[in-house]
Amino acid sequence: MEARQLVTVADFLLATLKDERIELINGEIVKRPMARFNHALAQSGLSDEMATFKRRKDGGGWWIVTEISVRYNQHHCPTHDLAGWRKERVPTPPAGVMETLPDWVCEITSPGHEHKDLVTHLIRLQTYQVPYYWIISPENKTLIAYELAGEHYRVVFSKECENSEDCQRVFIPPFQEQGIDLGYIFGMS
């Protein structure tokens, strides 16, 4: 049996010149799914809801960006739907592929690619000790939020929105101080 050769970040960066919808997952170049309306609506809605956290100038605040590649190691450089860094830890906006581990990551599931978000990313982010990981499913109108407790994630929030009254402002770590409007994120309000 021939050993599989792992792809490096350098190999991956060359490949992205040809195809922008790829990412490096565990040493393999993986095609990302085509963007869908529900996915884009949830991503832009959550980004809108995060604006107040991004604009804070009192020493707190966050850098929160969409579609960001983060280099975790030589063979793992996924592109997260949204990721955030506390400004107290990363005081100036970085450039290029992000080398600093995020404080928060949110992935939005795509049909046929759920395993990557629900298992692969969850295990990797837990291994690298990313403090918060959220998973949003636009199809099911659900949000699950994980927080590190020691070395392992624990669920700190889980919600399925069945209607707009059921899906209002929620207060989820690390953004519990102001909350986010789930109805807005899912296009229900």
Image (cartoon, grey):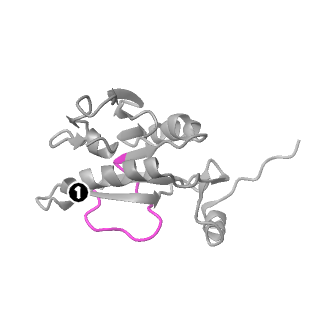
- Density class for disc 1 (Cα within 10 Å; few <14, some 14-19, many ≥20) is some
Residue depicted at x 41% and y 39%: 136
Left or right of 174, for residue 146: right
Picture layout, residue 48 above or below residue 136: below
Helix, strand or loop for the magenta stretch, by majority: loop
Please state if 104 lies on the left or on the right of 171 as rendered.
right
State yes or no: residue 88 in magenta. yes
Residue 61 visible to the viewer: no
The image quadrant of residue 141 is top left
Q: What residue span does the magenta drawing correspond to?
A: 87-104
- State yes or no: residue 9 in magenta: no
Query: Toward the viewer: 23 or 97?
Result: 23
Residue in the picture at 68% in, 57% down? 7
- The furthest residue to the left: 58
Residue found at the far right of this picture? 1
Q: Which part of the image, by quadrant, shows the C terminus?
A: top left
Q: Is residue 166 above or below residue 102?
A: above
Can you give x and y, in whole percent of width and height, for residue 106 in the image?
A: 40, 45
Of residues 159 and 84, which is closer to you in this image? Answer: 159
Which residue, given by chain and number where applicable, does mark 1 sit on? 51
Q: Is residue 110 left or right of residue 3?
A: left
User: In the depicted view, which residue is nearer to us: 94 or 171?
Assistant: 171
Which residue type does callout 1 highlight?
Answer: Ala
Q: Residue 39: horizontal and vertical position, in percent?
A: 45, 48
Residue 95, image x and y in percent? 40, 71
Residue at point 45%, 70% (across, down): 96
